[in-house]
Image (cartoon, grey):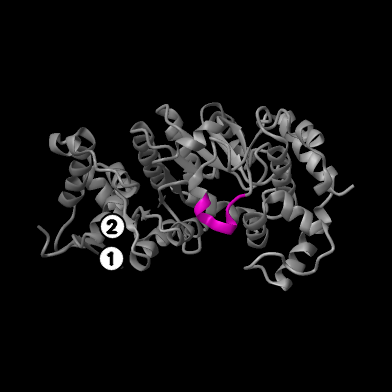
Amino acid sequence: MKISALDPFAARRALDGVTTVAGLDDDAIVERYARVVWNVVTEPGDGVAGRLIAALGAAPALAVVEGGSVIAPVEGVSTREFAEGRRRWSPRLRSVDVDDALALARARGVELVCPDDPAWPHRVDDLGPHAPLALWVKGEAAALASLTPSVAIVGARAATSYGEHVAGELAAESAGRGIPVVSGAAYGIDAAAHRAALAVGGTTVALLAGGADRPYPAGNGRLIDRIAESGAIVSEVPCGGAPTKWRFLQRNRIIAASADATVVVEAGWRSGSLNTASHARALGRPVGAVPGPVTSAASAGCHRMLREFDAACITSADDVWELVGLEGDSSQRRSGSMDSRSRTDDASRVTDALSVRVWRGADDLARRSGMTRQQVEALLGVMLLEERVEHGERGWRLRFATS
């Protein structure tokens, strides 16, 4: 029997325990099951499938694919694209694969969320035909509906202690102000952002490249479980799906689309985080980058964003606040909060350790200022962007014109 010929009773039984079935009429049940079928047979971001479903609906589009027509039935999909799509989808077009995905989701406590559900994050609809067909959620599905406003904080897996520290501060202050933090649960910057948001009792959502039922990376399994307890673990890949390289790249578009803005804390010259930032820019979402030491390869991608892509320079949570379209915390600025004073005092300590004539290395400046090398290099990176210092082979020194 063809999947498209599945009767509403069988579809309702298959979906029960995984998604809402009560109150849905037969047509809605079949349409929801058809979305699961499409979700199983396509890879993330399949634009041909997306255009077919947008034009016909999931169930009618499935019937067309299983039928004998060789001509694309909708405008915007060529005959060649339709034929190639059918060749891609046919090997997976078996009911056993769909039933297995639903059974695994039911067993692992993973919920199916579709575009007509209250929890659906409508910002991802901006992806058009490349939007996810459905989302699989472990944890609080309602967290997806709370991502307005929100910020994606992403960065290098091989993060430095400076990068993890900055990511933690930005995430903690953002989440503490009620701005959910979105990231990818990877090692390094992602993990630091999630942990910090959890530490202040904020909302954080992790987008996985594989199924929501299989924590990845395994070393972050406990962290991923903690995110699911108060936030949400989300994937557009059915349960059991492997986190392949392609799915990582496609996952990044959902991270970018889910949030109001994307902040890259650390990134190498060809970091995957730049891919997330590119998706955000393509969607018209604001993008920010945290400057780092000019000597650090882990910040090369951020500096590239600042120089070539007109990214906003992010040095505090107030910058994030403004990036997502909210006013900065002016009360803290007027009163001179402890955080603001500490940043100013630290910069003053580095300035005092510098000379306008003598070049000094980072280790020497750390000794003179009583700070760690990582703290000094972070401040020097900001001061270099502000043209307050200059850097050469022999180290650092103040510019003569410094104020």
Residue at 63% across / 45% down in the picture? 134
| Quarter that holds the C terminus | bottom left
Residue at 59% across / 58% down in the picture? 129
- Residue 158 visible: no
The kind of residue tagged 2 is Gly
Relative vertical location of residue 13 with respect to residue 193 in this rendering, above or below: above
Residue 219 is situated, as x and y percent measured from the top left of the image, at 61, 38
Residue identified by numbered label 1: 394
Tell me whether circle 2 and circle 1 mark residues in contact (CB < 8 Å): yes
Q: What element carries label 2?
A: loop
* Majority SS type along the magenta span: helix
The kind of residue tagged 1 is Arg
Task: Answer with left or right where residue 74 lies relative to residue 380.
Answer: right
Q: In which quarter of the image is residue 26?
A: top right
Q: In the rendered structure, does residue 186 fall within the stretch colored magenta?
A: no
Residue identified by numbered label 2: 361
Task: Answer with left or right where residue 32 lies relative to residue 144.
Answer: right
Residue 264 is situated, as x and y percent measured from the top left of the image, at 42, 52
**Magenta segment boundaries in residue numbering:** 125-132
Q: Residues within 10 Å of mark 2 (few under 14, many from 20)?
A: some
